Image (cartoon, rainbow, N blue to C red):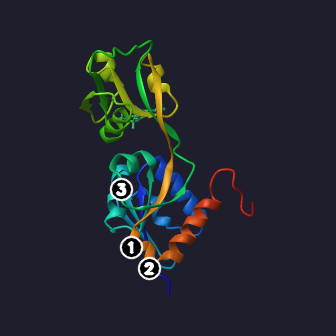
Amino acid sequence: MSQMISVALPKGRLGDQVYDMLEKAGYECPEIREGSRKLIFENTEKGVRYFQVKPSDVVKYVERGAADVGICGKDILMEYGSDVYELLDLDIGKCRMCVAGKKGYREDPERTLRVASKFTNIAAAYFASKGREIDMIKLHGSVELAPIAGLSDVIVDIVETGNTLRENDMEVLEVIAPISARFIANKASYQFMEAEINAMRDALAGGRDGEEAGK
Ligand code: PRP
């Protein structure tokens, strides 16, 4: 009999989209749609167990083997440099990691650049690669406020529609990397459940936007 796969599913819109894809692929767990406060859902017949996890915590469950596989944004993988296999780009949750500032912002090379971000590792690596010294300010949300309030010169953050920047008179200054959701696996799990994990990966690959069955 094949092994039960545990899946760390991010709570929220991305997780809902991924669960839809998995449900269509035969990994359904109807209870998940009931909107309860439960955090674990299991369908023993289908050999799948879902953990509902905060998006930024998915990688911790997978890296340490509490979940065999999971779905998380490339931003999180870049920020934490996680030791997991990245098996598939799901082509959803697409956005860009950017440097942004107030409209018309011009950098003063004579001064240390003040950078506010939730993604301090990504920001540090990016500016180090450019040989630019920075003063890092770690924030936890509403990062766009920092340049407006005079806390920082620029921010490093995710831009999806660009609405948050536009509505705050800000603009993208540089694009650091494109971001999208990835299907990841724990390295040890992948050794002993390769067939099951590959089957789930293939099912997700078949369910991506614009990829009809048989195409
Ligand atoms: C994210 C990100 C930007 C915004 C970008 O924030 O940090 O603020 O979305 O999206 P947009 O380009 O479509 O406007 P989130 O909504 O996660 O909230 P936060 O500010 O609390 O981090």
Q: Name the residue that disc number 1 marks.
A: 188
Tag shown at residue 192: 2
Who's the residue at 50% across and 34% down the image? 160
Q: Amino acid at mark 1?
A: Ala
CA gap between label 2 and label 3 equals 20 Å
Asked if disc 1 is less than 8 Å from ligand 1, the answer is no
Q: Amino acid at mark 2?
A: Phe
Residue closest to the eye, 31 or 131: 131
Q: Amino acid at mark 3?
A: Ser
Q: Is residue 160 above or below residue 28?
A: above
The secondary structure type at the circle numbered 1 is helix
The picture places residue 68, in percent across and down from the top left corner, at 41, 69
Q: Which quadrant would the C terminus be assigned to in this image? A: bottom right
> Considering only order in the chain, which callout, 1 or 3, is on the residue closer to the N terminus?
3
What residue occupies the far front of the structure in this picture?
Answer: 131
Tag shown at residue 82: 3
Who's the residue at 53% across and 52% down the image? 17
The secondary structure type at the circle numbered 3 is loop
Circle 3 residues within 10 Å: few <14, some 14–19, many ≥20: some
Residue closest to the eye, 47 or 99: 99
